[in-house]
Image (spheres, grey):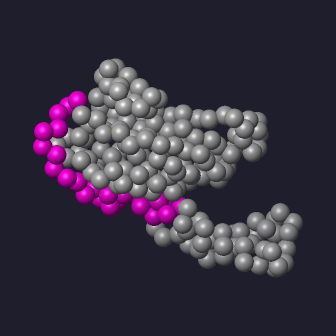
Amino acid sequence: MAIDKDAIKEHIKGILIALGDDPEREGLKDTPDRVARMYEEVFEGMNYTNDEIAAMFDKSFEQPGCDSSDMVLVKDIEVFSYCEHHMALMYDMKVSVAYIPNGKVIGLSKIARIADMVAKRLQLQERIGSDIAYIMSKATGSSDVAVVIEGSHSCMTARGIKNNSSKTITTTLKGKFETDIALQNRLFMSLNHGVK
C-alpha cells in the first residue's frame, strides 16, 4: 500500500485549523506538503510486509565452517520510530542484533537496513524487536536470533509524566538465545563490555 500524500496534506491542514491556526499564513502555507513528504520518508516501512523486507535484504554468503558457537553481533544501530499510541517520537534508539549463522551470513549493512526499515512504521518498541527477529530469521535461515533495543519515548519525556531520563529496554530472544543461558550471558556481556 502506497502512502497517500494528498490525503496527508488535507488532514494536516485540518489539524492546523483544529489547533486554531491559519494554514494560509506565511509560516504554515507549505507545512501540509512538508509534513506529507516527511511522512513518506519516515514511514517508508509501512509500504512493506516483514516478508517483503526479508526478501529485499536476503542476499547471503555461504559460510562453511561456521559452528553452533559462532555469533554475529551488530550493536548500537541508531534508529528512530513513532509510537502508534500517540504518534510520538521514539528517539535515541540503539538496536543490537545477534544471530548464530546456519551455514550462511548476510552483509552487516543489511542488518542495519533491516532495523531501519522496521522502525519506519507506526510501532511499539516491543514489536520492532520481534519484527527484526522474524526478518533476520527469514533472511539468514537461522532460528537463533536476538534483538536488544534501548530507547527514549517522547510520550513519556515530553508529555504525561515528563520523565526525561527514562529509557525503555526490550529484548527479543529466539532459538538458542532463548534457551541457552551461557549464550545469553555471552550476548549480554558483549553488549555491556565489548566482545568476550
At x 66% / y 76%, what residue is drawn? 33
Q: Residue furthest right?
A: 20
Q: Which residues are magenta?
A: 43-69
Horizontal relation, residue 175 to residue 65: left or right? right
Quadrant in which the C terminus is drawn? top left
Q: Quadrant of residue 29?
A: bottom right
At x 62% / y 71%, what residue is drawn? 36
Query: Is 56 colored magenta in this rendering?
Result: yes
Horizontal relation, residue 52 to residue 168: left or right? left
Residue 8 shows in this picture: no
Of 188 and 10, nearer the camera is: 188
Residue 37 shows in this picture: yes
At x 82% / y 79%, what residue is drawn? 26
Of 181 and 5, nearer the camera is: 181
Q: Residue 171 location, x and y as percent? A: 46, 33
Q: Quadrant of residue 142?
A: top left
Query: Is 145 colored magenta in this rendering?
Result: no
